[in-house]
Image (cartoon, grey):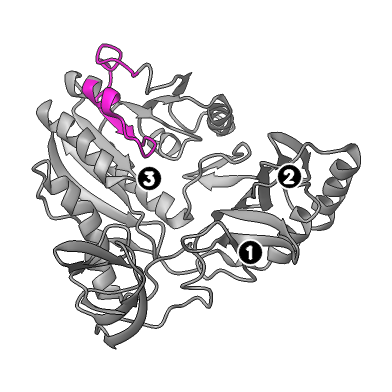
């Protein structure tokens, strides 16, 4: 048993102490706490909290500490706000960006409309839930306080459906999206389905009034067209498409980006997906939307066409921007731009943006570290950061979304 005093909470949510000048990481520990820990090596477990932080609160979930989905439910709001904002300011400060960000946008519990469960057949039956902390074991859930009510209320139906899916030694990935007309479910990593298994799953999808079921990239049945609302349009996303986890966060980000680029006549939306920003931007600007997924672009294009000319023109292009970024020459007609890349960032694309004549850029990212690299390139190209808005789409976790507005 070792006694430690926690110096700070690290970027992954663990408390960090030092022992003989070596860092020790303690899950669920808070800054300033004195505690005894068990184990050896750089990672330890709390045995006894001798002196608790004033910021320690009761977790909202009965599975907290076992389920690996949330790391920070034990941290009070004030400390949480400071810690999560620091996840944005620290990497940006390393590239010379010291502008004070807006207050972190936080959303209520029970707001997340999309999640990915794991499922595994065991001696006790099919287990459906999230992986256990520091383990590959699955914590079977009967509720999750961060998910929207409609998903929680249908966990039994999802479990019943998944129970009829043939499994391998690897867990199934079960993506669930709450749409306007029912749950859209995509299951990956299943064994190939027999015709009997296929028919059982189709019947269960109908019986449980789910909107669509896709297994191993094959859509088995679509009882109704699953759709979501983006700005003033109705979008039918393809199975397992990238959709912002929180509807309100999506609306807020779109409004922030659209307000900033409102005076621009022609706007580029790079990594546009199903049109999170493009369909809002098209209310005031012609949009050039670029995305690698052809299915996502089809959803965007269909949604735009169904508005009957109420939106300005949206031109789409299927393109891998990591391999072939839009060049500065191709951007010569654009006076505004938004990009929302994967976690790896958009380094090559930002080099082209920096060379372009684009005046306003909205940079959206789920990874402040790669965002810092991207912004450093834009700053060298003559841009200036005007505003930083951190957004807490994944409450109680180390993940944070950021919108940065730049102008030259």
Based on the picture, tell me whether residue 327 belongs to the magenta stretch. yes
Residue 150 is tagged as 1
Q: Residues within 10 Å of mark 1 (few under 14, many from 20)?
A: some
Checking the image for residue 95, the label placed there is: none
Q: Which residue is mark 3?
A: 254
Between 269 and 285, which is closer to the camera in this rendering?
A: 269
Q: Earlier in the sequence, mark 1 or mark 3?
A: 1
Report which quarter residue 156 is drawn in: bottom right
Name the spot of residue 75 as percent of width and height, x first. Answer: 32, 75
The residue range painted magenta reads 325-351
Q: In the rendered image, which quarter is residue 364 located in? A: top left
Asked if residue 66 can be seen in this view, the reply is yes
Q: Residue at 40% across / 56% down in the picture?
A: 393
Disc 1 versus disc 2: nearer the observer: 2
Q: Earlier in the sequence, mark 3 or mark 2?
A: 2
From mark 1 to mark 3, how far is it between C-alphas?
A: 24 Å
The mark found on residue 213 in the picture is 2
Q: Quadrant of the N terminus?
A: bottom left
**For the residues carrying marks 1 and 3, which lies nearer the camera in this image?**
1
In the depicted view, which residue is nearer to us: 338 or 6?
6
Q: Residue at x 32, y 42 (%)?
A: 365
Residues marked 3 and 2 touching at CB (< 8 Å): no
Residue 304 % position (x, y)? 53, 31
Q: Earlier in the sequence, mark 1 or mark 2?
A: 1
- Kindly report the secondary structure that dominates the magenta region of the rendered protein: loop
Secondary structure under tag 2 reads strand
Vertical relation: 185 (above or below) 284: below
Give 209 or 25, whichever is nearer the viewer: 25
């Amino acid at each position: 048993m070792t006694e430690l005093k926690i110096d700070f909470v690290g970027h992954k949510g663990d408390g960090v102490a030092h022992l003989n000048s070596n860092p020790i990481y303690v899950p669920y520990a808070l800054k300033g706490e004195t505690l005894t820990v068990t184990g050896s090596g750089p990672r330890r477990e709390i045995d006894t909290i001798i002196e608790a932080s004033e910021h320690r609160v009761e977790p909202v979930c009965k599975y907290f500490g076992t389920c690996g989905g949330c790391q920070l439910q034990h941290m009070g709001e004030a400390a949480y706000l400071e810690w999560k904002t620091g996840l944005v300011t620290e990497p940006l400060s390393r590239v010379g960006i010291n502008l004070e960000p807006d207050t972190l946008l936080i959303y209520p519990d029970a707001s997340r409309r999309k999640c990915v469960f794991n499922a595994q057949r065991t001696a006790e039956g099919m287990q459906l839930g999230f992986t256990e902390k520091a383990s590959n074991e699955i914590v079977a859930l009967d509720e999750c306080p961060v998910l929207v009510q409609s998903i929680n209320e249908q966990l039994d139906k999802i479990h019943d459906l998944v129970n009829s899916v043939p499994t391998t030694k690897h867990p199934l990935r079960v993506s669930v999206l709450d749409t306007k007309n029912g749950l859209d479910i995509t299951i990956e990593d299943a064994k190939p389905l027999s015709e009997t298994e296929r028919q059982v799953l189709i019947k269960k999808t109908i019986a449980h009034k789910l909107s669509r079921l896709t297994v191993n990239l094959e859509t088995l049945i679509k009882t109704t067209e699953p759709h979501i609302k983006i700005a003033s349009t109705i979008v039918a996303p393809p199975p397992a498409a990238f959709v912002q986890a929180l509807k309100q966060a999506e609306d807020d980000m779109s409004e922030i980006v659209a307000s900033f680029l409102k005076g621009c006549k022609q706007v580029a939306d790079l990594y546009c997906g199903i049109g999170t920003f493009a369909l809002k931007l098209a209310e005031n600007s012609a949009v050039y939307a670029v995305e690698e997924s052809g299915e996502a672009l089809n959803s965007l294009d269909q949604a735009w066409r169904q508005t009957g000319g109420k939106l300005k023109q949206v031109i789409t292009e299927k393109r891998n921007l990591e391999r072939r970024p839009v060049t500065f020459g191709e951007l010569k007609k654009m006076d505004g731009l938004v990009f929302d890349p994967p976690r790896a960032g958009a380094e090559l694309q930002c080099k082209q943006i920096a060379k372009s004549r684009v005046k306003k850029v909205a940079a959206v990212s789920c990874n402040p570290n790669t965002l810092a690299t991207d912004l450093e390139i834009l700053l060298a190209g003559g841009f200036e950061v005007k505003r930083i808005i951190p957004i807490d789409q994944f409450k109680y976790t180390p993940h944070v979304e950021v919108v940065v507005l730049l102008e030259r």
